[in-house]
Amino acid sequence: MATIELLADRITDLEKRIHGLMKTTETNDTSLENSVIHNLLDVNTLISSAMSGRENINLITKRLPELNSYLDPLVESSEIPVEAKFQFLSAMTREIKQNYEMLKEIQELMSILESDHLKDVPELTNKLNDLNLTYLKLYEAVQGFNSRVNEFFSKYNEVITSISKSLITVDRIVTIAEIEAKPMEERDIDCMI
């Protein structure tokens, strides 16, 4: 028996154990209606047809093992000399120390971050939103009140300005009337003074 046939038989047996005996097809009494092998073959056909005619995807697929090797942090590249790695680490020393200091500070502040006040923030967000809406309504009401007060003060200023003008006019008229009411000699003396 070929290796593929043996594998197919093992998968069919596994499917029967997991799913139980389902309806069998008319062509093969031992295969299931939607066998894993059939589904795998369908998926392989779909992938092959999708990749045909697309050279960029085929090139990337061929290079996947190489790309995976670059992503593996345990594999050390032998192409980079030790001196170059040392120079790189020496150049990064300052940044590494800064990162270490920031990490130490974060660890010191962790107790603050884990406090009950900060843990309650998600629950209090709704209350804060409600307070913001209330504040906005009050702000709009105060703005309306401010505009009415500004209108009142502008009308008050207009009234005061008109009264001041009237008083100046009345004062001028009274002064002229007083001057005309004095006898002639007093007028001349007043003019000299």
Image (spheres, rainbow, N blue to C red):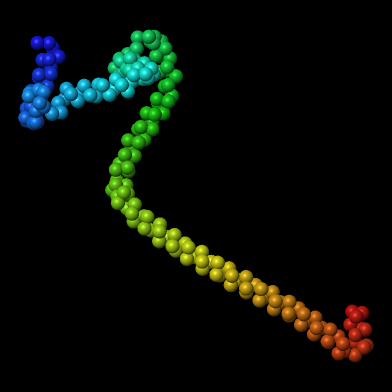
Residue shown at 9%/31% (left/top)? Answer: 23
In depth, the one of 61 and 46 nearer the eye is 46
Q: Position of residue 12 (x, y in %)?
A: 10, 23
Question: In the image, is residue 78 above or below residue 110?
Answer: above
Q: Quadrant of residue 162?
A: bottom right
Quarter occupied by the C terminus: bottom right
Q: Position of residue 124 (x, y in %)?
A: 32, 53
| Total marks placed | 0
Q: Position of residue 135 (x, y in %)?
A: 42, 60
In depth, the one of 171 and 66 nearer the eye is 66
Residue shown at 39%/29% (left/top)? Answer: 99
Using the rendered image of the protein, determine whether residue 142 is visible from the camera's viewpoint. Answer: yes
Horizontally, residue 29 falls left or right of residue 172, namely left
Q: Residue furthest front?
A: 26
Q: Quadrant of residue 111?
A: top left
Horizontally, residue 24 falls left or right of residue 59, namely left
Question: In the image, is residue 104 above or below residue 149?
Answer: above
Residue shown at 83%/87% (left/top)? Answer: 177
Using the rendered image of the protein, determine whether residue 14 is visible from the camera's viewpoint. Answer: no
Residue shown at 7%/23% (left/top)? Answer: 30
Quarter occupied by the N terminus: top left
Question: In the image, is residue 145 above or below residue 16?
Answer: below
In depth, the one of 136 and 28 nearer the eye is 28
Q: Quadrant of residue 2?
A: top left
In depth, the one of 139 and 34 nearer the eye is 34
Q: Position of residue 38 (x, y in %)?
A: 18, 23
